[in-house]
Image: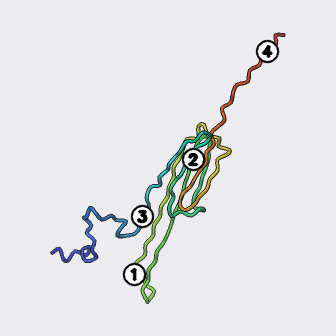
């Protein structure tokens, strides 16, 4: 009876815990990892955004909140010689994450995107040393 299972003919067992859905049906969307490193005068933030184009990434600053968002869409069509679909797949993925900018000079943040890695340079705010002065009595 097991020989009639359509998944077995394709070499795929839906209950096999060692085979992922992504292996069989293509690369899915994975959560994007972010690493933040502190240096003397700045923070360096690296966010993995594989598969996204530069134009699909948004970086917004609202007050003391930095939000990184990205949206990805792709479509794969396979047709037979008659022009009819034998397979049509679509994938959509989005990412959105916010970070607190307390202690960061938000006006001087810079961003670069290269080979799927978004790198933000977040300069630290310069501490304001209070000025001392003496008031004259009138």
Is the residue 47 above or below the residue 63 in the image? below
Give 79 or 24, whichever is nearer the viewer.
Answer: 24
Residue 128 on image: x %, y %: 68, 30
Is the residue 138 above or below the residue 87 in the image? above
Q: Label 2 belongs to which residue? A: 44
Q: Are marks 1 and 3 in contact (CB under 8 Å)?
A: no
Of the two numbered discs 1 and 2 in the rendering, the one whose residue sits closer to the viewer: 2
Q: Earlier in the sequence, mark 4 or mark 2?
A: 2
Numbered tag placed on residue 98 in the rendering: none
Is the residue 23 above or below the residue 124 in the image? below
Q: Earlier in the sequence, mark 4 or mark 3?
A: 3
Q: Label 3 belongs to which residue? A: 28
Q: CA distance from mark 4 to mark 3?
A: 67 Å
Give 91 or 24, whichever is nearer the viewer.
Answer: 24
Image check: 41 left or right of 27?
Answer: right
| Residue drawn at 50 percent across, 56 percent down | 48
Callout 1: SS: strand
Is the residue 59 above or below the residue 104 in the image? below
Q: CA distance from mark 1 to mark 2?
A: 47 Å
Residue 109 on image: x %, y %: 64, 47
Q: Label 4 belongs to which residue? A: 135
Q: CA distance from mark 1 to mark 3?
A: 21 Å
Q: CA distance from mark 4 to mark 2?
A: 43 Å
């Amino acid at each position: 009876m097991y020989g009639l299972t359509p998944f077995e003919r394709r070499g795929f067992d839906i209950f096999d815990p060692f085979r992922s859905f992504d292996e069989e049906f293509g690369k899915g969307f994975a959560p994007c990892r972010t690493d933040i490193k502190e240096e003397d005068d700045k923070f360096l933030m690296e966010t993995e955004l594989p598969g996204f184009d530069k134009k699909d990434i948004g970086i917004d600053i609202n007050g003391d909140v930095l939000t990184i968002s990205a949206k990805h869409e792709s479509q794969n069509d396979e047709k037979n010689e008659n022009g009819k679909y034998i397979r049509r797949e679509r994938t959509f993925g989005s990412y959105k994450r916010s970070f607190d900018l307390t202690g960061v000079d938000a006006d001087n943040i810079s961003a670069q995107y290269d080979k799927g890695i978004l790198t933000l340079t977040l300069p630290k705010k310069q501490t304001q040393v209070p000025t001392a002065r003496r008031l004259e009595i009138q």
